[in-house]
Image: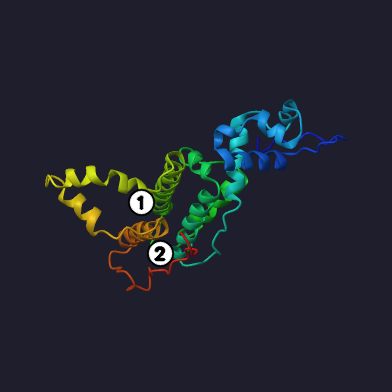
Amino acid sequence: MWDRPEPPSKPSPTPLNRDLIVGAAIRLADGGGLDEVSFRKVAAALGAGPMRLYGYVETKDELLDLMVDEVYGEITLPEPGADWREALTRIAHGMRAAAKRHPWFVDLLGGRPHRGPNSLTHIEATLATLDGRQEFPTIDDVLGAVSTVMAFVHGAVRNEVAEAREEQASGLTEEQWQAASGPYMRRMLATGRFPRLARVMFDAEHTNAAAWFDTGLTYVLNGIATRHNPAWTPGGSASAPSAPSTAPAGP
């Protein structure tokens, strides 16, 4: 698909190209999830006949690949040579922000790498944050660290999107759901069988999703720094400094 040229343009009252098709598909998915994406619905949104789309995109899988690649193109990448922790933090927050704008994006992450030009550029820039640095002497070191960060990011954003979907489906916020299940949970905790869970419920700081994401990402980055420089301590080593968060303000 990536090497296949678009068909030559022909005079038509309804212009059509891959960019228009992908844009319409993304708007449908943003509004109702991937189940809303079909050639018939995309064509209707563009005022074109469904069969015309097949000259540009042959299958729904191709369309989904194009949509994912478009979202990867929205993510701002770090400047070359930036501190590796700061660079990976920026990439992680870019992935989270993209998933918040396009919740369906998380459903298409993981598995085999995407091969579109924006996806490949994103992978290359992510690997470049570590490649050539003394702490990561081999490409396997680079790949292992990057894969660990991406595994955290994918899991964290999936959880966040799943919570948003639960809230939409049930009509209950997380706080309202917790309040509704409170009597049952108090009875269970009163048995004394779940002392650590009781501490989580009554003593933990139940902060927002953005803060949880920052906390988890810090654990991951600190672990990578310690693995590749055992002498490193948070804020205490020039070779692997603790980078300030580049998280955007807000939830």
The residue at 48%/38% (across/down) is 112
The colour scheme used to paint the residues is: rainbow
Camera-nearest label, 1 or 2: 1
Q: Which residue is mark 1?
A: 175
164, above or below 12, in the image:
below
How many angstroms separate mark 1 from mark 2 (CA)? 46 Å
Residue 135 quadrant: bottom left
The residue at 55%/59% (across/down) is 77
83, above or below 15, in the image:
below
Q: Residues within 10 Å of mark 1 (few under 14, many from 20)?
A: few
- Three-letter amino acid code of the residue under disc 1: Glu
Question: Which one is in front, 155 or 207?
Answer: 207
Q: Residues within 10 Å of mark 2 (few under 14, many from 20)?
A: few
Q: Are marks 1 and 2 in contact (CB under 8 Å)?
A: no
Q: Which residue is mark 2?
A: 134
- Three-letter amino acid code of the residue under disc 2: Gln
The residue at 43%/63% (across/down) is 85
Image spot of residue 120 (x, y percent) = 57, 47
Image spot of residue 198 (x, y percent) = 19, 52
The residue at 42%/41% (across/down) is 166
Residue 204 quadrant: bottom left
Q: Secondary structure at mark 1?
A: helix
Q: Residue furthest top?
A: 51
Q: Residue furthest left?
A: 192
Give residue 211's mark.
none
Of labels 1 and 2, earlier in sequence is 2
- Side of 193 where 21 appears, left or right: right
Question: Which one is in front, 107 or 100?
Answer: 100
Residue 185 quadrant: top left
- Side of 200 where 84 appears, left or right: right
Image spot of residue 5 (x, y percent) = 74, 36
Q: Secondary structure at mark 2?
A: loop
